[in-house]
Amino acid sequence: DIVLTQSPALAVSLGQRATISCRASQSVSISTYNLMYWYQQKPGQQPKLLIYRASNLASGIPARFTGSGSGTDFILTINPVQADDIATYYCQQNRESPWTFGGGTKLELK
Amino acid sequence: EVKLVESGGGLVQPGRSLKLSCAASGFSFNDYWTGWVRQAPGKGLEWIGEINQDSSSINYTPSLKDKFTISRDSAQKTLYLQMSKLGSEDTAIYYCATISGSSGFAYWGQGTLVTVSS
């Protein structure tokens, strides 16, 4: 299985930039396609798709969310961080079955 | 509006079976792969499996393949998860979701809680 590793938590101040990383145990890219996805989950809610194929913003997601990366290293950036962004963020790969998720990064206020 | 509504969760005794349902509305259900993801209390997300549009292809995460069965009824626009031999490790919120290689898990239901306990 492809293992996705995320830092458990990140503390950030409102209005600042948050950088959340995800490292895969093997490449999740095929040709020009980077099969990495990012989700936001708030307490008591279902996950919500933020970014698909590493860098594409899902419908209705604010432009302060951006995704980048290829191969094994990916980043979700939130800039500037707003109070509504306090949540847990998960990366997920569709390169190889079984589809796997990272352990999640909990974004906290400094 | 896209809606996925899970039902069928609750308290179940160890070793018993349970069947979850996921009713879809507001989009072309029959155009999508759909599947199940679960989340144990305070833990991360775990993909269970998926089924294609005409049920000809069904994939599972290997550790759950012998316990769980996914099916769908296109006429009823409903996805199912049959769970057997349940243990305490299966206690979780179970989400249904649409799945595609281009957009990942795009739409999610609100989840249904399954608690396995005597």
Image (cartoon, coloured by chain):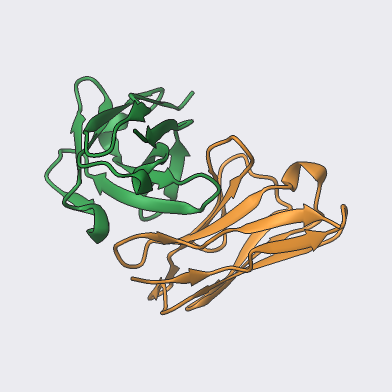
- Apparent side of residue A71 relative to residue B15 in the rendered image (left or right): right
Viewer-side residue, B92 vs A67: B92
- Apparent side of residue B57 relative to residue B29 in the rendered image (left or right): left
Up-down relation of residue B101 to residue A59 (above or below): below
Up-down relation of residue A20 to residue B81 (above or below): below
Residue ranking furthest to the left: B56
Residue A24 in percent (x, y) is at 47, 74
Up-down relation of residue A104 to residue B115 (above or below): below
Q: State the hue of chain A.
A: orange
Residue B95 in percent (x, y) is at 41, 38
Residue B117 in percent (x, y) is at 36, 35
Looking at the rendering, in which quadrant would you find the N terminus of chain A? Answer: bottom left
At a point 36% along the width and 52% down the height, the residue shown is B47
Q: Which chain is green?
A: B
Viewer-side residue, B19 vs A16: B19
Viewer-side residue, B16 vs A38: B16
Looking at the rendering, in which quadrant would you find the C terminus of chain A? Answer: bottom right
At a point 27% along the width and 47% down the height, the residue shown is B50
Up-down relation of residue B29 to residue B43 (above or below): above
Total labels drawn:
0
Residue A2 in percent (x, y) is at 38, 71
At a point 62% along the width and 39% down the height, the residue shown is A60
